[in-house]
Image (spheres, rainbow, N blue to C red):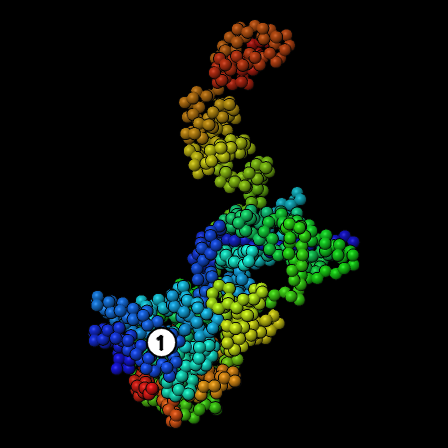
């Protein structure tokens, strides 16, 4: 079946004119019709627009366009509901944006289009990317394809679920504290968070500007490499994007792990990791060793402060980033007698609980009298965490850890306990604070129920190529990426 | 007890750039509402700011013009507050690391030179403009994102008039440096005034009142002239002042309370994560320094001192920089700058104004004025002849010497020919000649006129007078 192909598998068939882009797109739409009633990954699909893009890709193919030139030509890719696509909604799974439609294309959207991708469908997420389960969506939760009772992770839960349920050939998400890697781990796909500055943030609705980064969720490492290659690069519209050359990520794949030094951070291997996760992880470490990697234990002493630091920095930035949703210029408005009551009414009704919680927290940590104790101190700790990474990377090429301490939990299980929910990101958060790159890929399953387990590899800044190469070597030596959820 | 006012000003002025601070929209006044806007300056979801390089340069340049330090590290911050004209509900500004710090402005006041210290001049984005209609309000975001420089002074001002002169000098400096057009009509300059009073000669500061958002210098002067006596009267009546923000009502001519310290905004400043810190390097700063211009006061003092011209002439050359430049070229190697200044101001400037042309349109070199003055001074031509030469220069260009030659304007001082004309005039007019001989000295003027007529104006009038007197007195 067409929808079962990997992205690269589909691209090869398109390039060989064995299938058309319309057939590929139709296969995704059919699959959505068949399974999304249960998975609920998609918030909306503009079918006419999707098929129109596919027809345009077919026209280009008919004129002799190639996948060497446009690696994603005719490939349907879904987008998290926070990317600005001209003429399309971008709700961020929030009510507050109402009937807003973006008046412009973001840079990632433009680059993916340049590479030929058919960008279709907005996939579900935690409201404004705040959450770890996609339960914070104002439009209902998304279900984990391996066990519909369970969450897909978040905030890019819709992306992970859509990829794993084979409703698209890849999906673009964002990762602020683990929002790509954590759902990839819980759903059993590959999720890559590039180095901060590697991919433009222009046209991505901001949650925490100094932490947000765009990345792919895909069926395997090669697909991830293709998607990253299409999106990466300096953007003059994003002052924080870095003018570093973009290597050929696909060409860098292959080979074993001989001479690669992998670090095991002592502070990550704590009590409280689910035994199934721990066993799969230990097995993965052995596998890497068998492939030629040297394993070194390293220390990252400030790890325990990661979550606290994150929830100060991220919420502070969010409190300002989300201020613009005020009902004045766009989105939902609830009138009031004066501007102040208009703001209160609009934001009171438009934002969900978790978003309000974080705005209040962020406002508090920036307040006069508290700034030094919270925000300033968090910035200092952030520097120390970054230094932990720099020091570790002096002796190793990459770090390996479990992505999440436990497999997917049941919906509703942690909704009343935000702190417990925050701990789901304990292994992914530091990477964002340090600004470096990380990937999560399948490394096994728990027994009963059968739930995916993720292996996280963290690389040096701008060494996504090496990260992908390590992940690819491991992936090719293991069967996990070929497992499919039965729906 | 005698009191003195302690006044500091925060002056906001729009920078003279083509585009806005963080996007490519035109920085232009007077367009239809919400036509110079884009997703970035409307604060749409997902947009990011990109700093305007020219605005960064103009900020550093202002720093140099105000004798500020331009530090090697500066950054942008977010100032958070909800208001409909603030599109993102935060304003990008510079909080603890501004682009320029600690400078000063010298200006003429009360017959001397006063100095006001500058705390900082920092860069930020302007906000939109709220318009209120009968049943609703609207926001025009054309102004949102226009680069705005906030120049903060130390509380060194002591009176409304002094503040007024400081503002005018500051405006002159900014216009001079090409930093801002400072067009008050277009709202390009706006002021906040901080005022307190204290016993005269004291060193402690009194309770500070801030008057917000005034858009004329005369308004600032009037507001201070209202507010200072109000504060003094309050204290003299045994009352206390509260730290507060007040609004100036220009029609009523009074200030009124807006909010007290307890209700002051907490702006929750924090570093703008969408922008990298500014780390100007030496090459960049050198490029900015190459744009430094001489300040108005320094120019005035230099012209008066070096060229010995009156202060009011120097003012003309300060107010009209190209004319001053022309003057400086004209006086190179000249012995009589004052006369040259007269020609440049009284004749050249007048003709330029009449014809609506500029220095750049002139058909002659500055050295031509120098030559013109020289041949008048040496008596080669009369001042009347000089006017004719200048008129020709202005119309068609050329050199004064050639024009004198072509038009035969050279004065005759040669005694042979003059003697002959003078004798003929005496012979032809015995009446006036006798009158002179009989002591009516004025009678010589008639004879002089006859000689000038005979010479068709070319005779040197001074020599004619001397020759006539000699012949008549025989």
Tell me which residue sits at (41%, 77%) in the image: A124
| Residue B425 in sight in this render | yes
Q: Residue at x 58, y 51 (%)?
A: B215
- Relative to B382, B266 lies left or right: right
On what subunit does the disc labeled 1 rest?
Answer: A
Q: Is residue B201 above or below residue A324?
A: above
* A401 in relation to A29, above or below: below
Side of B204 where A242 appears, left or right: left
Say which residue appears at 50% left-offset and 35% top-offset.
B353
- Residue B374: give x, y in percent of width and height: 50, 28
Position of residue B90 measured from the top left corner of the image (x, y, whole percent): 53, 65
Judge by depth and name the residue closer to the eye, A239 or A294. Answer: A239
- Of residue A480 and residue A330, the one placed in the foreground of this image is A330
Residue under the point 60% across and 6% down: B434
Is residue B153 in view from this perspective? no
Residue B242: % across, % down = 70, 62
**Vertical position of residue B434 compared to residue A9: above or below:** above
């Amino acid at each position: 079946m067409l929808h079962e192909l990997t992205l690269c598998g589909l691209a090869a068939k398109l390039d060989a004119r064995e299938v058309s882009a319309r057939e590929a797109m139709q296969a995704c739409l059919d699959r959505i019709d068949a399974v999304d009633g249960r998975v609920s990954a998609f918030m909306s699909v503009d079918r006419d627009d999707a098929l129109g893009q596919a027809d345009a890709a077919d026209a280009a193919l008919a004129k002799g366009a190639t996948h060497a030139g446009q690696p994603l030509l005719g490939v349907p890719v879904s987008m998290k509901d926070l990317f600005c696509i001209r003429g399309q909604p971008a709700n961020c799974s929030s009510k507050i944006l109402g009937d807003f439609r973006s008046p412009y294309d973001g840079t990632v959207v433009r680059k993916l289009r340049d590479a030929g991708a058919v960008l279709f469908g907005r996939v579900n997420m935690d409201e404004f990317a705040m959450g770890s389960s996609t339960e914070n969506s104002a439009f209902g939760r998304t279900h984990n394809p391996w066990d519909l009772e369970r969450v897909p992770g978040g905030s890019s839960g819709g992306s992970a679920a859509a990829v794993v349920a084979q409703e698209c050939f890849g999906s673009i998400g964002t990762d602020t504290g683990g929002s790509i890697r954590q759902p990839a781990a819980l759903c059993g796909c590959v999720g890559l968070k590039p180095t901060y500055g590697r991919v433009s943030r222009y046209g991505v609705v901001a949650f925490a500007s100094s932490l947000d980064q765009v990345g792919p969720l895909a069926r395997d490492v090669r697909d991830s490499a293709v998607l990253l290659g299409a999106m990466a690069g300096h953007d003059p519209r994003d002052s924080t994007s870095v003018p570093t050359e973009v290597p050929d990520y696909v060409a860098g794949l292959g080979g074993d792990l001989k001479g690669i030094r992998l670090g095991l951070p002592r502070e990550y291997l704590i009590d409280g990791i689910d035994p199934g996760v721990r066993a799969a992880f230990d097995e993965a470490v052995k596998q890497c060793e068998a492939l030629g990697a040297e394993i070194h234990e390293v220390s990252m002493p400030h790890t325990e402060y990661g979550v606290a630091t994150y929830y100060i920095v991220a919420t502070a930035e969010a409190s300002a980033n989300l201020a613009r949703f005020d009902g004045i210029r766009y989105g939902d408005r609830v009138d009031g007698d004066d501007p102040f009551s208009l703001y209160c009414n609009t934001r009171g009704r438009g934002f969900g609980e978790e978003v309000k919680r974080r705005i209040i927290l962020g406002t508090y940590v920036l307040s006069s009298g508290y700034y030094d104790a919270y925000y300033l101190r968090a910035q200092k700790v952030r520097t120390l965490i970054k230094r932990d990474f720099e020091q570790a990377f002096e002796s190793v090429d990459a770090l390996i850890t479990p992505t999440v301490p436990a497999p997917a939990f049941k919906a509703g299980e942690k909704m009343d306990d935000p702190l417990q929910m925050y701990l789901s990101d304990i292994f992914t958060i530091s990477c964002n604070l340090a600004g470096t790159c990380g990937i999560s890929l399948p490394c096994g399953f728990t027994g009963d129920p059968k739930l995916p387990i993720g292996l996280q590899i963290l690389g040096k800044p701008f060494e996504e190529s090496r990260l992908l190469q390590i992940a690819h070597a491991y992936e090719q030596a293991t069967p996990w990426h070929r497992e499919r959820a039965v729906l | 007890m005698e009191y003195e006012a302690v006044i500091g000003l925060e002056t906001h002025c729009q920078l003279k750039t083509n585009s806005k601070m963080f996007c490519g929209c035109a920085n232009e006044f007077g367009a239809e509402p919400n036509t110079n806007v884009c997703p970035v300056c409307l604060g749409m979801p997902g947009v990011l700011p990109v700093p305007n390089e020219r605005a960064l340069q103009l900020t550093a340049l202002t720093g140099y013009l105000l004798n500020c330090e331009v530090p090697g590290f500066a950054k942008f911050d977010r100032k958070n507050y909800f208001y409909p004209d603030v599109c993102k509900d935060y304003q990008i500004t510079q909080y603890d690391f501004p682009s320029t710090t600690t400078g000063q402005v010298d200006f003429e006041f009360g017959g001397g030179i006063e100095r006001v210290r500058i705390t900082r001049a920092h860069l930020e984005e302007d906000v939109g403009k709220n318009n209120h209609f009968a049943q609703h309000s609207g926001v025009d975001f054309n102004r949102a994102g226009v680069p705005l420089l906030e120049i903060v002074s130390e509380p060194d001002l002591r009176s409304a008039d002094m503040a007024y002169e400081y503002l005018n000098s500051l405006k002159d400096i900014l216009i001079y440096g090409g930093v801002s057009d400072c067009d008050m009509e277009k709202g390009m300059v706006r002021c906040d005034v901080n005022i307190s009073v204290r016993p005269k000669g004291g060193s402690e500061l009194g309770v500070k009142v801030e008057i917000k958002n005034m858009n004329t210098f005369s308004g600032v002067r009037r507001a201070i002239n209202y507010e200072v006596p109000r504060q003094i009267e309050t204290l003299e009546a045994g009352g206390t002042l509260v730290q507060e923000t007040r609004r100036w009502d220009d029609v009523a001519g009074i200030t009124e309370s807006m909010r007290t310290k307890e209700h002051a905004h907490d702006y929750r400043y924090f570093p703008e994560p969408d922008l990298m810190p500014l780390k100007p390097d030496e090459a960049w700063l050198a490029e900015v320094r190459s744009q430094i211009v001489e300040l108005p006061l320094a120019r005035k003092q230099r012209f008066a001192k070096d060229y010995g011209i009156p202060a009011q002439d120097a003012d003309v050359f300060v107010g009209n920089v190209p004319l001053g430049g022309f003057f400086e070229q004209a006086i190179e190697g000249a012995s009589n700058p004052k006369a040259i200044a007269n020609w440049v101001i009284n004749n050249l400037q007048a003709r330029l104004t009449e014809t609506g042309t500029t220095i750049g349109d002139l058909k002659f070199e500055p050295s031509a004025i120098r030559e013109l003055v020289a041949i008048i001074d040496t008596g080669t031509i009369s001042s009347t002849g000089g006017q004719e030469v200048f008129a020709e220069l202005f119309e068609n260009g050329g050199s004064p010497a050639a024009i004198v030659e072509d038009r035969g304007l050279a004065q005759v001082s040669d005694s042979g020919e003059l003697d002959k004309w003078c004798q003929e005039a005496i012979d032809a007019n015995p009446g006036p000649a006798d009158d002179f001989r009989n002591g009516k000295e004025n009678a010589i003027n008639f004879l002089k006129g006859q000689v000038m007529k005979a010479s068709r104006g070319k005779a040197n009038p001074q020599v004619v007078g001397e020759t006539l007197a000699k012949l008549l007195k025989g």
